[in-house]
Image (tube, coloured by chain):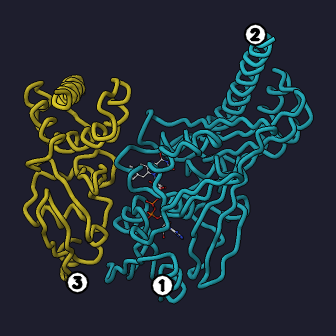
Amino acid sequence: MAASEADLGRSPVALTINGRRTVLDAAPGERLLDALRRAGWLDIKESCGEGECGSCTVLLDGRAVCSCLLLAQSAEGADVVTAAATGHRVVGALRRAFVEEMGTQCGFCTPGMVLAAADLLTGDGDPDEAKIRRALAGNLCRCTGYHRILRAVQRAAAELREEVQP
Amino acid sequence: MFVQSVVRARSEVEAAWLVYEGKPATRLIAGGTDLMLQLRRGQRQALALIDLRRSGMDHILENEHAICIGATATVAALAQHPGIRAHFPALHTAAATLASQQIRNLATIGGNICNASPAADLVTPLLAYDAVLRVRRGDDVREVPVDRFFTGPGQHVLTQQDLLVEVVVSKPLPSEGERSRFLKLGFRGAQVIAVVNAAVSLRLRRGLVAETHIALGAVAPTAVRAISAERLLRGEKLTPEAIAAAAEAAVDDISPIDDVRSTAGYRRRVVRNFVRLALEEIAAQVAAETAHGSQRSRSRA
Ligand SMILES: Cc1cc2nc3c(=O)[nH]c(=O)nc-3n(C[C@H](O)[C@H](O)[C@H](O)COP(=O)(O)OP(=O)(O)OC[C@H]3O[C@@H](n4cnc5c(N)ncnc54)[C@H](O)[C@@H]3O)c2cc1C
């Protein structure tokens, strides 16, 4: 399907990705997921392609969304953040914490987990376990059993709180 | 059939006229969480899309009498709104537990309604609260009560030229003492379409049920009101016997089917239990508030 659909003239979509202004070329019906991966953002993963698994999560204007459900054309003017973002305080802290707590095994779900957690920690610096579980309910991991992922998010939250306090 | 063009509407007026003048095979897209999958699976076709994401119809405005929710307000915004939480707890709970954060951030109330799934989680609360839908065709706006909006699974009264612009929910007067509940059964606590969902609102006057709406989802071609259960309750005290009778009657108000998610028989059972549970919870809330209230007046004396 992708091949023939992509033949329909692509048009430019101007947006910001990880702090850099970028222009993506996207066919009219194309998903943001496909346009981003074609542009080289391979840290965004596709698993289910149906909004169930969270692997393709990106931050869109600060909020976690499934890039498999969003038209690339709809992202015109948006601020997109991926798990590879440098200079993003919350995403950076989460990435470090996932490594330190070994919150990742095969790694396929990790970028989505990091970004779903970033959405949470941006609005709530000290979430309890139930809140973290709820925030990650849209992300599936088939390796870790989630335990170390929870610990990673708690660790990142604690680090971010310390940073804020003098 | 592939999508050949996407037009981004920049205002409600522009969206309304784009829809009004749209060619056949033009569709609206809001959050895309239903439509993107339907297009990919070939369940729906579109040559052109009108994108509502930046149409500025995402307001949630509260005044003394009502809360007006723009059609493209996201489910996440609904879940966070303090006025919705305070006055329409069933709508709050339905929004807060719908799908996952990633979906709630995209999904809109207008999309949930217009997709017209019999299992749509926001629709049962809207039925319980007698919401009114404001529909625009060109420059004309008409109001459609939510209980006259749906005509079947995936079907509603809007034509190709209509745009849903706003959902209006009227606040009960404090003196009407309204309580409400939302219950949902799915295979897990998140990210699931309901096997059954239920929203119940109830007003008491001097200890008697003055009004109640019992709305049930995923148990008929559209979300439905349990009219005979409601009728049994009006004028009654909220006793265990009255609650049991209403729960039994609600089963006659539905026409569930066997499908991928459940069986008709199980859905009947869940409806009976949900109606009982929601009413019991409301009765317990009333009892707790009454005890609290009399304690307060005693301590003041
Ligand atoms: C993984 C997953 C989990 C889900 N879980 C749930 C759940 O728990 N509960 C639930 O109820 N739903 C669930 N859904 C379904 C979906 O997310 C909701 O129905 C959502 O509210 C749809 O809104 P949208 O803005 O994304 O709609 P869209 O997909 O953009 O639109 C849906 C339909 O409505 C029409 N439309 C949209 N806006 C308007 C308008 N203003 N006027 C006229 N027509 C309009 C569109 O043309 C389209 O036909 C889930 C979906 C996914 C992918």
Q: Residue B199: x, y in percent?
A: 66, 41
Instruction: Check disc 1 and give the amino acid type.
Output: Leu
Q: Residue B104: x, y in percent?
A: 42, 49
Image: B90 above or below B108: above
Mark 3 Cα shell of 10 Å, populated few (<14), some (14-19), many (≥20): some
Closer to the camera, B228 or B170? Answer: B170
Q: Residue B285: x, y in percent?
A: 70, 24
Would you say A25 lies left or right of A117 here? Answer: left
Which secondary structure, mark 2?
helix
- Which residue is denoted by mark 2 in the rendering? B299
Q: Which residue is found at the position 60% from the left and 35% from the top?
A: B183
Confirm or reject: label 2 Cβ below 8 Å from ligand 1: no
The cyan one among the chains is B
Would you say A2 lies left or right of B119 here? Answer: left
Which secondary structure, mark 3?
loop
Mark found first going from the N terminus, 2 or 1: 1
- The chain carrying label 2 is B
The yellow one among the chains is A
Q: Is residue A143 visible?
A: no
Instruction: Check disc 3 and give the amino acid type.
Output: Leu
- Which residue is denoted by mark 1 in the rendering? B18
| Residue A8 marker | 3
Quarter of the figure with residue B30: bottom left
For discs 2 and 1, the disc positioned in front in the rendered view = 2
